[in-house]
Structure formats: structure tokens, C-alpha cells
Image (cartoon, rainbow, N blue to C red):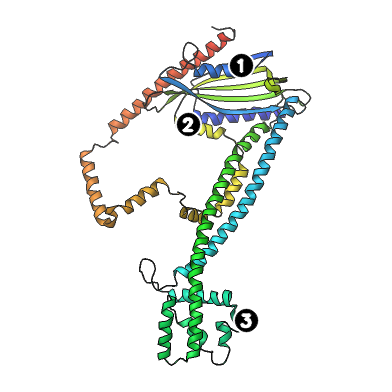
């Protein structure tokens, strides 16, 4: 009794949610068919075909076609039945594939962190190279260029010369008698190319610096500039390579996620409904199937519709699955038993239909969400680096703003604003107000007329479907 009470509460709660989104049904009709020896699949496919077909074998018209969406498709089967075993075998194969893809995605996500980290290190080093000149590429002066040059020289001494541990390095020679001034001169004089070294050494000779120090200093500066030029090219080439590899890595991850989605969707469907139905008994070989389709009647022309005649058909099957060998020796289940069918007519807008689909969509994509969350932690860096490689992340508003900035008028923002305000003023004078009360009323009554027409179409379509269904299956009609 407690389980039946819970089930009734669930049904009432679902009906309340449907009423909140769909509103009140124009008409509701119900049929229950109990055929123990006949398959229940024929009712579903008959209704599907009849809705899509044109007269005399359907309710669609040449200028009005029904577009069918499957809203609900769940099942439950008794654990001891052959049908349950067949489903579990297929689900196991899907789960193995998901496990393989998720393991690959996990490894690729860890690699993604390493790639981003390497790019950060490369960018930090490139900052020294880009800012170690008095002027940038556009000819604008760089205020802190000497600090960047000194930082690069420190890196060269530590990595290339081995720092103070090497007695022939700049710091090592600075500890010897006669070369104490060498480190100060090395970190003070900043020639921009190797040709400039000779000129700077001549300037030091005028200041009285002895020849031996000038020779050693000139040699060290020449070696440093040669290292700076070659490593600068190398690190830029490395950055381009890593950026291209990042884009490839990112696209492969997206490909794996695309492959993963259908498997997760299939597993969710093969999981079945976990509710404890009274009709599904562990000791019996029974199954419970719930289906729901929404048929939306659309005009085939370009005329815009605000309201659509809709037919909602709900199926509730309690069946006995009978395993039988079909074509190519594949075992499949033939369901026979009790069928309950509800026919409901509505007039709905696109917004209501989309909300209803979203409410019914209960796909479990938490695994994919976890992958996206891990990638989202690198969102800003990932977005920046992928944009460098040509990935488009801009929204339509950003594109329009960018086009406006790049236009000729962007060079004269004040003039642009003034002219735009003038044109807006003329537009207000010569263009009628589209939001006048009269037009609002006209739009309101136009919607009401369209809604009334849709209501009539939905009610007629529902009755024809219900009446012909009963006659086609030799039931009593009146």
C-alpha cells in the first residue's frame, strides 16, 4: 500500500508539472487494450504512421505537416527474466567502452595541464626577450627594458656559464684580482647587437678601462648576444609548436567527448527505470514500458506561426517479453500484454514545447560535466592560447563591436555618436511608434484568432486519431 501511495503521489506531481508548462488540455481521451497473445508495439507504430501520413491514411495535410518528438522512453524489467539478461549483456559492452574513453580523457586532461604550464613558462621567458630592447616592434619606447636585459643576462650566467661555481664565468672572474669590475660592467653595458660591442669597447677605452678587461668583457657580451638571438628564435618556434599541439590536443579531447555522449545516453536508456512497479515481479518475466510522443502541426510555407496545434500521446505498457530469434539469428523480445494509451490535445507555443522537452530530458551526463569542469579551471588560459591558433570564441555581440571599432567612424567616436543620435531623432519623427496601443490590441487579437484556429485543429485532429484508431483495431465506436 505504501508503494502504491508513493506511485500515486509521483503521478500527481508529474501531472502538476505538466499543467504548469502545457496548461490545461483541450480534450483528453483514453483507451486500454488487453491482448495477452498480441504484441503491443503495433499500437505505437500505427499511431506514429497515422499522424505522419496524409489523408485518407493519416491526419497530416499537404500544407500542414505534423512534426513528432519523442519526449519519454523508459522501461523496467524483472531481474530473473531472459529479457533483463539480454539488456544487461548489451549494457556491459557499452560500459566497457565508456570506461576506456573516460580513462583516455582523464590522461589527456592531465596532459592538458602540463601543456598549459609549459606555455606559461615560455610566455614568461618571452617577456624578457620582447622587453629587452629600448623600443618595441611599433617603435614605442619601453621604460623597463634595462631590467629585462639584466634578467636575461642573469639567466645566461646561471644556465650557460654555471654561475659563480665556474671560475671562467663573469661572476667567477669577478672574484679574481684585476677583474673585480667585470660583473658591474657586464650588467651595465647593453649593446643591442654584436656589431655594437666593438663600439662600446672603444668607449670604455676612452674611460681608461684596461685592455684585458675590455677583451674579456667584449667576448662575454658577444657570446651573450649570440645566445640571446638564437634562443629567442628557438623559444618562439617552441611556442608555435606547443600552441599547435595544444589545439590538436583540445580537438582530440572534443572528439572523444563526442564519441562518449552516445554511449552514456545508451547506458542511461539501458539502465531502465529504478522505480518499484507493482506490475514488475522478480519471479515473473514481465516488463513495464512508458512512452510519450508530442506531435506539433506546422505550416509547410514560410508563414510564421505563434501557436501550434499539438497532440500528446502517452503509452503505458505492462507486457510479457518473449525472446525469439529474428533475422541473422539475433535474439529480440516481442512484447505482449496490457496497453494503456492517453490522447491529449493542446495549443502550445515553441517556448512551452522547449520547456516541456527540457523538463522531461533526464540524461545523466555527470561524467562529461566533470571533464568540462576540469577544462573550465583552465578556461582563461585555454581560451587565450587557442585564440592565438585561430579558434573562434567571440559571441555575435563581440563581433559586431569589433567591426564597429575597426570601421572608419571608430576613429571619430564623438562624431559617430552625434550623427547616430541625429539619425535616431529623424527615425523617431518619421517612423510610427510600433508599440502603440492600437497595434498592441491588433497583435493581441491576431494571437487570439490564431490560438482559436489552432485549438480547433488540435481538437479535430485528436478526435480523428482516436476514432480511426478504434475502428482500425475493431473496437466499439460511437
* 1 or 2: mark nearer the eye: 1
In this rendered view, identify the residue nearer to me: 23 or 418.
Answer: 418
Count numbered badges in the picture.
3
Is residue 186 left or right of 199 when viewed as pictured?
Answer: right
Residue in front for this viewpoint, 357 or 163: 163
| Disc 2, SS | helix
In which quadrant of the rendered view does residue 1 lie?
top right
Whether residue 29 is visible here, answered yes or no, is no
Q: Which residue is mark 3?
A: 165
Asked if residue 101 is positioned above or below residue 171 in the image, the reply reads: above
Point out residue 425 in the picture as x, y percentages from the top left corner.
22, 45
Answer few, some or many: residues within 10 Å of disc 1's Cα (few below 14, many 20 plus, some between 14 and 19). Answer: few
Q: Which residue appears at 60% of the width and 25% of the height?
A: 291
Q: Which residue is mark 2?
A: 352
Q: How far across and how far down the image is residue 224, in percent?
A: 50, 76
Closest to the camera, between mark 1 and mark 3, is 3
Q: Residue at x 46, y 53 (%)?
A: 387
Amino acid at each position: 500500500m505504501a508503494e502504491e501511495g508513493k506511485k500515486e503521489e509521483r503521478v500527481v506531481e508529474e501531472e502538476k508539472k505538466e499543467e504548469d508548462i502545457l496548461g490545461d488540455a483541450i480534450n483528453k481521451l483514453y483507451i486500454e487494450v488487453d491482448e495477452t497473445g498480441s504484441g503491443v508495439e503495433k499500437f505505437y507504430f500505427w499511431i506514429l504512421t497515422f499522424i505522419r501520413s496524409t489523408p485518407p491514411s493519416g491526419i497530416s495535410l499537404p500544407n500542414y505537416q505534423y512534426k513528432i518528438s519523442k519526449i519519454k522512453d523508459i522501461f523496467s524489467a524483472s531481474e530473473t527474466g531472459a529479457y533483463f539478461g539480454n539488456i544487461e549483456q548489451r549494457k556491459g559492452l557499452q560500459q566497457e567502452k565508456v570506461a576506456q574513453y573516460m580513462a583516455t580523457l582523464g590522461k589527456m586532461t592531465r596532459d592538458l595541464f602540463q601543456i598549459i604550464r609549459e606555455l606559461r613558462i615560455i610566455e614568461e621567458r618571452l617577456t624578457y626577450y620582447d622587453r629587452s630592447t629600448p623600443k618595441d616592434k611599433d617603435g614605442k619606447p619601453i621604460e623597463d627594458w634595462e631590467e629585462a636585459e639584466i634578467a636575461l643576462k642573469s639567466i645566461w650566467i646561471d644556465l650557460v656559464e654555471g654561475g659563480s661555481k665556474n671560475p671562467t664565468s663573469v661572476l667567477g672572474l669577478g672574484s679574481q684580482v684585476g677583474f673585480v669590475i667585470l660583473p658591474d660592467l657586464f650588467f651595465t653595458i647593453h649593446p643591442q647587437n654584436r656589431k655594437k660591442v666593438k663600439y662600446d669597447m672603444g668607449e670604455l677605452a676612452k674611460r681608461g678601462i684596461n685592455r684585458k678587461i675590455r677583451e674579456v668583457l667584449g667576448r662575454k657580451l658577444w657570446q651573450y648576444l649570440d645566445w640571446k638571438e638564437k634562443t629567442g628564435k628557438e623559444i618562439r618556434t617552441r611556442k608555435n609548436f606547443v600552441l599547435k599541439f595544444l589545439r590538436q590536443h583540445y580537438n582530440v579531447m572534443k572528439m572523444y567527448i563526442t564519441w562518449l555522449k552516445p554511449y552514456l545516453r545508451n547506458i542511461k536508456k539501458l539502465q531502465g527505470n529504478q522505480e518499484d512497479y507493482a506490475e514488475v515481479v522478480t519471479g515473473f518475466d514481465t516488463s513495464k514500458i512508458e512512452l510519450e510522443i508530442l506531435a506539433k502541426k506546422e505550416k509547410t510555407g514560410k508563414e510564421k506561426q505563434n501557436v501550434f496545434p499539438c497532440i500528446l500521446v502517452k503509452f503505458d505498457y505492462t507486457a510479457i517479453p518473449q525472446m525469439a530469434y529474428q533475422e541473422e539469428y539475433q535474439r529480440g523480445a516481442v512484447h505482449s500484454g496490457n496497453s494503456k494509451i492517453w490522447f491529449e490535445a493542446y495549443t502550445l507555443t515553441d517556448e512551452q514545447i522547449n520547456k516541456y522537452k527540457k523538463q522531461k530530458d533526464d540524461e545523466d551526463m555527470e561524467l562529461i560535466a566533470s571533464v568540462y569542469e576540469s577544462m573550465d579551471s583552465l578556461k582563461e588560459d585555454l581560451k587565450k592560447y587557442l585564440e592565438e591558433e585561430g579558434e573562434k570564441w567571440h559571441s555575435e555581440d563581440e563581433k559586431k563591436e569589433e567591426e564597429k571599432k575597426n570601421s572608419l567612424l571608430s576613429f571619430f567616436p564623438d562624431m559617430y555618436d552625434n550623427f547616430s543620435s541625429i539619425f535616431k531623432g529623424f527615425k523617431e519623427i518619421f517612423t510610427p511608434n510600433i508599440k502603440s496601443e492600437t497595434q498592441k490590441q491588433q497583435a493581441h487579437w491576431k494571437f487570439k484568432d490564431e490560438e482559436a484556429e489552432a485549438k480547433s485543429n488540435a481538437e479535430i485532429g485528436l478526435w480523428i486519431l482516436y476514432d480511426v484508431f478504434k475502428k482500425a483495431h475493431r473496437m466499439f465506436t460511437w
